[in-house]
Image (spheres, grey):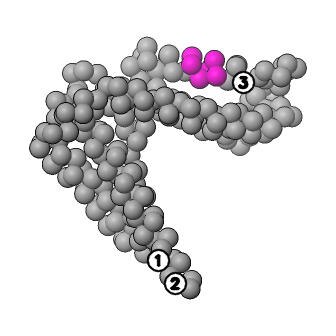
Amino acid sequence: MGNLSHHIKFLLIISILILVYAIGLSYQLSSLVLILSFGLFLNNADAIEHAWFRGIFIYKNLSNDLTQLYQLSAESAFIIRTFFFVIFGFTMNIYDLNNVDIIANGLFILASIFVIRFTYLRLFRKENSGAETFIAPRGLISILLYFNLPASLKMPQVGPAFLFMVVLGSSLIMSIGLLTSRKKVKAIEE
């Protein structure tokens, strides 16, 4: 990328991301972990001290290019999340939410998530654990991991309706918790 003089540089990185994702799929590896590793590599490439590596991969405008790539990915992530949740909505049958087992399992998982989070924060981070307890959203990654499971590993009790219940429930709890803690902070300030 350092040798490219054209203003379109990020197609190369996006192409490499697609290649890494395809390699992960072809070898039955977790493609999301490989993409995460690639992002960690890009963000920390300047920390690698080998002269050969620095001569090939590090160039003068690397930090500017990575900043622009970060902005591009942040803006495109919004669009991708929006379309992904629309597709998730298409895959779900709303009548599955009438199932008592799905509701019970969803409530159990939600309670487990927040009890474990509260216990962890109380044990290891005693200050300010009230508002942080409620910040445990489940969303895109949970859904992506579910859809990437092979059919043989999927359980009939855990389907799109169950995921919807957990995602929506954690989002609602987070919203209510943040609103409540914000009101408490304003009351203390006054």
The answer to which image quadrant residue 144 occupies is: top left
Which residues fall within the magenta stretch? Answer: 14-19
Residue 107 relative to residue 46: left or right: left
Look at label 1 and name its amino acid.
Lys
The quarter of the rendered structure image containing the C terminus is bottom right
How busy is the neighbourhood of tag 3: few (under 14 within 10 Å), some, or many (20 plus)?
some
Give me the residue at 37% from left, 34% from top: 143
Q: Is residue 130 above or below residue 44?
A: below
Label 1 or label 3, whichever lies nearer to me, is: 1
Q: Relative to 123, does residue 190 appear above or below in the rendering?
A: below
Question: Percent x, y for residue 8?
Answer: 78, 21
Residue drawn where x is 11% and y is 44% of the image: 100
Badge 1 is on which residue? Answer: 184
Q: In which image quadrant can residue 130 be found?
A: bottom left
| Residue carrying label 2 | 188
**Picture disc at residue 127:** none
Gap between marks 1 and 3 measured at Cα: 45 Å
